[in-house]
Image (spheres, helix red, strand yellow):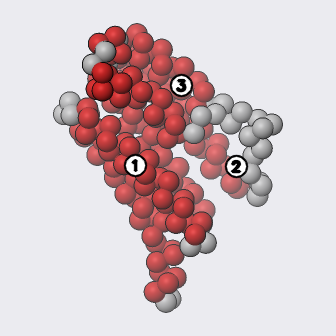
Amino acid sequence: MNEQNIISKYVPNFITLLSLSSGFTSIRFSLNGNWEIAIYLILLATIFDFFDGWFARKLKSGSNFGAELDSLSDFVSFGVAPSFLIYLWSTNSLGSLGWGATLFFVICSALRLARFTADIYITNKPIDNNEFFTGVPSPAAAGLILLPLFIFFEFEIIFLKNEYLNLFITIFIGFFDDQ
């Protein structure tokens, strides 16, 4: 196998692993209460998520393995990490109700990503988004549930840390993540 084949085969998956590492490390910083670093790591995961697909297309190295790895990475980086961050930052004061909303968002993310990956095996043509609402993409859903946190850090609007507001946003966005 020549050097070009090695690069085209492994570079996209390596970038996907960087996305996964960023998302998982965000969880560590959330546990330590380092909210801003946790958010930046999710944003970094988004950048890596964009570039893994971009490199796979440019290098013509897309594979079923890469699609599976990307879905697993997205689940951690855009399902588990942001919902866990919101739970620890705001909704954990609601106890089981806050945890339930977090779990709901994670389940919806898992269902959407599993459905997306399964569609790769079922059909060779992309789903017509004009005909079917396929849900909010996982990175966008993560951004939407983190929006109050972004705004809170920028403008220090205390209301945005309200646990009921964040509970509603988490459930609402989770619902649209699973369409």
Residue 114 is left or right of residue 154, and the answer is: right
Q: Position of residue 140 (x, y in %)?
A: 52, 37
Frontmost of labels 2 and 1 is 1
Dot 3 amino acid type: Ile
The C terminus lies in quadrant:
top right
Say what secondary structure mark 1 lies in.
helix
Q: Position of residue 119 (x, y in %)?
A: 70, 49
* Rendered residue at 47%/52% (across/down): 49
Say what secondary structure mark 3 lies in.
helix
Q: CA distance from mark 2 to mark 1?
A: 24 Å
Say what secondary structure mark 2 lies in.
helix
Tag of residue 45: 1
Q: CA distance from mark 2 to mark 3?
A: 22 Å
Dot 2 amino acid type: Asp
- Mark 3 lies on residue: 173
- Mark 2 lies on residue: 119
Q: Residue furthest left?
A: 32
- The tag earlier along the polypeptide, 2 or 1, is 1
Q: Is residue 5 above or below residue 175?
A: below
Q: Residue furthest right?
A: 131
Residue 143 visible here: yes
Q: Is residue 62 above or below residue 49?
A: below
Q: Is residue 15 above or below residue 10?
A: above
Residue closer to the observer: 123 or 78: 78
Residue 80 is left or right of residue 89, and the answer is: right
Dot 1 amino acid type: Ala
Q: Position of residue 103 (x, y in %)?
A: 45, 26
